[in-house]
Amino acid sequence: MDDRTFVIIGAKGQLGTALREKYPNARAVDSDELDITNAEAVRNFDWSDITTILNAAVYANVDGSETTEGRVAAWRVNATGPRNLAEVAGKHGLTLLHISSDYVFDGTQKVHTEDEPLSPLGVYGQAKAAGDLAVSLTPKHYICRTTWLIGEGKNFVRTMLALGKKGINPTVVGDQIGRLTFTSELVRVVDHLLSNGAAFGTYNATNSGDIVSWAEITRAIFKDAGYDLIVTDTATKEYYASKEGVAPRPLNSEMDLSKLQATGFESRDWRDDLAEYTKKEMEQQ
């Protein structure tokens, strides 16, 4: 597998950064070099030596997507962009690997499988679902649905570590459940699918491990960091009661990993990756 024939879209984001580390010879572009929302720009990009598009570009502001400007941005980046990439992938016979989200579901199913009907709650999820549909029309495609991503950049673990360092006892949502997914794990999934020529299609792509709430994850973070603090659970409805412009969120984000693991992939437990990540963050403080 020659990563010189790869192009990483959204190269400056959390996942894009991790992909650049894995594939140092790939062409890496962000919105300043290629605006995927511009169909003409995408068509005119030099695809001549490219075999594989890794689309890590995303408008990730879930609450911002509910605003007038954010709604437009979310649809442009999360739906129109993937459609434009799908068009050139189909035209040039390229493989398109696209990163999706648990937000394409409403969270009412106990476990989300790849063939569950789309049922997004908010604008962010609706735009991501539209992107999935566009990508799925490309013959050579992978859609990787992930949850609760943690990597380089602003994220939940770093936010909680900052509170812990200040000695703050936080109140955290206790009725949204799922698993953390570390960019290192998601990159392993991407590399596994591409390296092994797995069947094209949609794959749930998260860490393995027990299904817990954000509050439980916070307790695990504090334990790994050595912070003796109290985490108080609260309901999503109560937590956001006094906040305006909040997007609806799926309460259950458990993804069934059996399809991915049937390809021979051995998933890492999120608690193991969290312990390593937290240790590294504490060493850098």
Image (tube, rainbow, N blue to C red):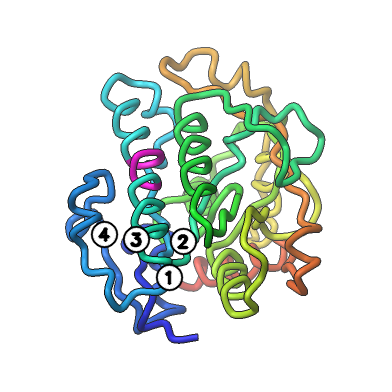
Helix, strand or loop at mark 3: strand
Q: Which mark is residue 52?
A: 1
Q: Amino acid at mark 4?
A: Asp
Residue range corresponding to the magenta coloring: 77-82
Helix, strand or loop at mark 2: strand
Report, in whole angstroms, how far the alpha carbon at label 1 lies from the one at label 4.
16 Å
Left or right of 182: which side holds 154? left
Helix, strand or loop at mark 1: strand
Q: Nearer the viewer, mark 1 or mark 4?
A: 1
Q: Quadrant of residue 6?
A: bottom left
Asked if the residue under mark 2 is in contact with the one under mark 1, i.e. CB atoms within 8 Å, the reply is yes
Nearer to the camera, 231 or 68: 68
Nearer to the camera, 159 or 209: 209
Q: Amino acid at mark 3?
A: Ile
Q: Which mark is residue 9?
A: 3
Q: Nearer the viewer, mark 1 or mark 3?
A: 1
Decide which of tag 4 and tag 3 comes sooner along the chain: 3
Question: Which quarter of the figure is the C terminus placed in?
Answer: bottom left
Nearer to the camera, 4 or 246: 4
Asked if the residue under mark 3 is in contact with the one under mark 2, i.e. CB atoms within 8 Å, the reply is no
Q: Nearer the viewer, mark 2 or mark 3?
A: 2
Decide which of tag 2 and tag 3 comes sooner along the chain: 3
The spot of residue 168 in percent (x, y) is 54, 41
Q: Amino acid at mark 1?
A: Thr
Residue 61 is a magenta residue = no
Residue pointed to by mark 4: 30
Disc 4 packing (10 Å; few <14; some 14–19; many ≥20)? some
The spot of residue 99 in percent (x, y) is 51, 53
Left or right of 72: which side holds 119? right
Residue under the image location 66 percent in, 40 percent down: 214
Report, in whole angstroms, how far the alpha carbon at label 4 lies from the one at label 3.
6 Å
